[in-house]
Amino acid sequence: MDEEKTYAGEKGDEVGRWTRIYHVPQMALDTKIDPFDKNAFINNLSNKRETVGDTFDRSAELSEKRAAARGGVDPVKQKALENYAAKRHGKRHPSELAQNMEKAQTEANKTLSKLGIKFNLTPPKSRRLK
């Protein structure tokens, strides 16, 4: 890096016009956060200027990592859903209801397809009032 490297242009007639500038490589040092450490996530966010959407994306990535490490179930998300239901006297979170509806629909489709019946529980798209 200290040795001199000269460049004279494509045709060789531009001697002395070019100066090579070296930069320190840019590296991201905090890309690996322990998905189970809440404090590491908070400390990492405090050092950055991110939008709320970026924060949600990072949180979703960590949730996927936790789920992959624990056999498909994120323990932090599961605890948050249980707390939601406990505060609302057993009412489940809408995301859980949607997942349960999809499971029920696939099971119903399997059962009814054996009988030759097509079944769909998805609601129609909302209509706009003119």
Image: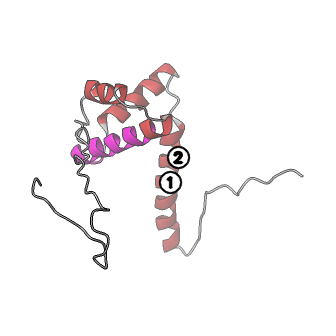
At mark 1, the secondary structure is helix
Return the x and y of residue 41 as percentages of the image width and height: 30, 30
When asked about the image quadrant of residue 82, the answer is: top left
Q: Is residue 6 left or right of residue 59?
A: left
List the residue tagged with mark 1: 102
Front-lying residue, 3 or 102: 3
Residue at the (31%, 77%) spot, across then down: 10
Kind of residue at badge 2: Ala
Distance from the alpha carbon under mark 1 to that under mark 2: 6 Å
Asked whether residue 89 is drawn in magenta, I would say no
- Main SS of the magenta part reads helix
Front-lying residue, 85 or 6: 6
Labelled pair 1, 2 in contact (Cβ < 8 Å)? yes
List the residue tagged with mark 2: 98
Q: Is residue 52 left or right of residue 76?
A: right
**Residues in magenta, as a range:** 56-72
Point out the residue furthest to the left here: 3
Residue at the (42%, 24%) spot, across then down: 83
